[in-house]
Image (cartoon, rainbow, N blue to C red):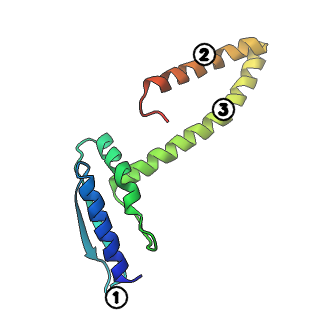
Amino acid sequence: MPLASCWAWAARLRASLARARRCASSARLAVADQDRHATYAAVTLDAVSDEAKLDAYDEIRSELDAPGLITEVGGVVPLQAAADEQVERDLARGEMIAMPIVLVLLVLILGGVVAAGMPLLIGGLAVLGRADDDPDAH
């Protein structure tokens, strides 16, 4: 990868961070290898709380990708964002698997579809009610 492409990406990244100054205070750039084909940018997020850091990261995430370059993101905040996304997918998959199993067990235990459906209906309404209260729910 030519060094000029790396520097062009870094210039775009710095310009993006300048526009979004409220979320990142700096982007330090350095050449990372001797043949001058790799670079890195260390971005410092200004946010204090973990939630604010995740919000700031979400805001600048698209700016970290560079067309024509192989880009990788590391650090505590990107790791937390990736973990949150994975947990959300896993919970959704687990719920999709568990609900039919619970319905069958409740029909067998309670002896009827109506009686078995009531706990599931109440649980579903509770989940929907919680999603309306939570502005971060997706």
Residue 63 lies left or right of residue 126; in this view the side is left
Residue 39 seen in the current view: no
How many neighbours does mark 3 have within 10 angstroms: few (below 14), some (14-19), or many (20 or more)?
A: few
Residues under labels 3 and 2: Cα distance?
A: 16 Å
Residue hosting label 2: 122
In the rendered view of the protein, which quadrant contains the N terminus? Answer: bottom left
User: Residue 2: x percent and y percent?
Assistant: 38, 83
Is 34 in front, or is 23? Answer: 23
Give the residue displayed 39% in from the left and 55% down from the top.
61
Give the residue displayed 72% in from the left and 19% down from the top.
106
Residue hosting label 1: 35
Residues under labels 1 and 2: Cα distance?
A: 63 Å
Residue 129 lies left or right of residue 14; in this view the side is right
Q: Nearer the viewer, mark 1 or mark 3?
A: 1
Secondary structure category for the residue under label 2: helix
Residue type at mark 3 is Ala
Question: Which label's residue is closer to the chain start, 3 or 2?
Answer: 3
Secondary structure category for the residue under label 1: loop
Residue type at mark 2 is Ile
